[in-house]
Image (cartoon, rainbow, N blue to C red):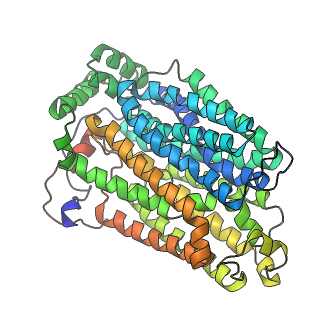
Amino acid sequence: MAELQIENSHSESFQFDEPKDQDRVEKAVLATFPAALASLSFGYCLGYSSSALEDLQNDNTSFNISLTAEQASWFSSLIAFGLIIGCLIGGWAIEKFGRKGTTMMCSVPFVLGWLLISYAQSVAILYAGRFITGVACGAVSFTAPVYIAEIAAARVRGVLASLRSLSFTLGVLICLATGVLCHWRWLAFIGAIPPTLVLILMIPMPQSPRWLLGKNRTDEALEVLLWLRGPEANIKEECSNIKDTLDRQGRLKCTDIGTPTIAKPLIISVGIFMFMELTGTDAILFNAANLFKIVGIANEKLVAISVGISQLIGNIFSCFLVDKVGRRKLLLTSALVMSLSLITLGVFFAIFIPAVDGGFATDADTSSGSTSPPAEEISWLPVSSIFLFNLMFSLAWGPLPWVLISEIFPLRARGFACSFVTTVFGVTQFIVTKTYHSMAAAFTIQGVYWAYAGFCMLGSLFVYLLLPETKGKTLEEIEDLFDRPVKQTYESIH
């Protein structure tokens, strides 16, 4: 454990003199927009289950498609299985075709998957569409944040990278809100619009200058940096710093994975992404409407929009705080509040919702009156707990892991490392979402939430022990931070 611990980021590091006051940021913001729109498509996919499943499980009129509880579970979790495949493909494509090209290519499976779901006449076609959109989600999940991180100057990288998560949450909210008004088929058809816009809007945007330099296309990289930073910025010095780093690194070899600059951030990233999913956020999101139905709320789909609203608010605050407060403090604070929220939610179920039918209240139970009157009278408590949980999750654990993987890996390993980490993320997401109902049946629903609360606490401990602060550092400075020999245990930040 001690070997993985890294020196506090407040200690001195080798400095690269990137101009921080003369470079402009307007063009970087413009180039961020279509990449963020790709993340909106990702969020729309994850929000689809909560809105659509209520209709799909009770719709016997549209081509006789009506999902059982087991089929609904597979429909929710297949996106995670597709995400795993997409991560593996994206790791190769991001190096072969670049960050821009891969982001554009993701639009194709997005549109194809949504059209398959929209026109599906069988459960198998629904599964296929869900899986294909998952493949697109897997590739775009790290391609978009890497693209944003590599075009942004250090002083605004955290803010721009957080826009990725803001747009992701906006996609979830749009899907939940549209699901109140639209049938699940129209909801899927609308989902094809954002990736179509990504394909069009990304065409005039520049390639990543770091990827261009990695391909020895120096003149193109200088043109991109001039467009992004403006004529007053010292783009030759920035280009020279990036080239020096690339020359020092060389090409990625299998033996390089064990070096500190790759092994340390890889272990940290895998741990943070696993804890991000083990908090249960996607299980709660996918089953939000059904969860509110269990506690006795009449219009559960409408109330489920509060999940998206809370995440949107959290992401907005994250954009302002990430480069002021720092990554570590946000992750530590939010994990503790998330844990308290889940404990409170579990206490509510333990006291007010009777444990039936294998350990948890089902839809049939709640509709037949098994929800006690006191539970209905304080239904604001679980709603508030879920709202607070999602608010704090979106403040840190939602956006910041994606910010971190886009900045802590050296360029030569960024494609491989991001692909590996997001693959682990997809596997963990699949396990968490697929086992939610079976765990609730085995351990009661409050037991599931208490388990998620325990993982929140473990996640905060993991961050406290292993994660250094990267706020305000260039990508080259961050690499130098991980390249140091371990001399002492990690200091706590005061």
Q: Which residue is drawn at 42% across and 58% down?
A: 274
Judged from this view, the residue extending furthest toward the right is: 61
Q: How many marks?
A: 0
User: Where's residue 263, x and y in %?
Assistant: 24, 50
Q: Which residue is drawn at 42% across and 55% down?
A: 273
Side (left or right) of 128 relative to 81: right
Residue 185 vs residue 46, the one in the foreground: 185
Position of the C terminus by quadrant: bottom left
Indicate whether 242 appears above or below 45: above
Residue 201 vs residue 140, the one in the foreground: 140
Judged from this view, the residue extending furthest toward the top is: 219
User: Where's residue 418, x and y in %?
Assistant: 37, 43
Q: Which residue is drawn at 20% across and 41% down?
A: 254
User: Where's residue 303, x and y in %?
Assistant: 76, 60
Residue 111, quarter of the rendered image:
top right
User: Where's residue 358, x and y in %?
Assistant: 65, 78
Position of the N terminus by quadrant: bottom left
- Can residue 62 be seen here? The reply is yes
Residue 70 vs residue 4, the one in the foreground: 70
- Can residue 343 be seen here? The reply is no
Side (left or right) of 395 relative to 366: left
Indicate whether 240 appears above or below 341: above
Residue 284, quarter of the rendered image:
bottom right
Side (left or right) of 146 relative to 479: right
Indicate whether 148 appears above or below 302: above
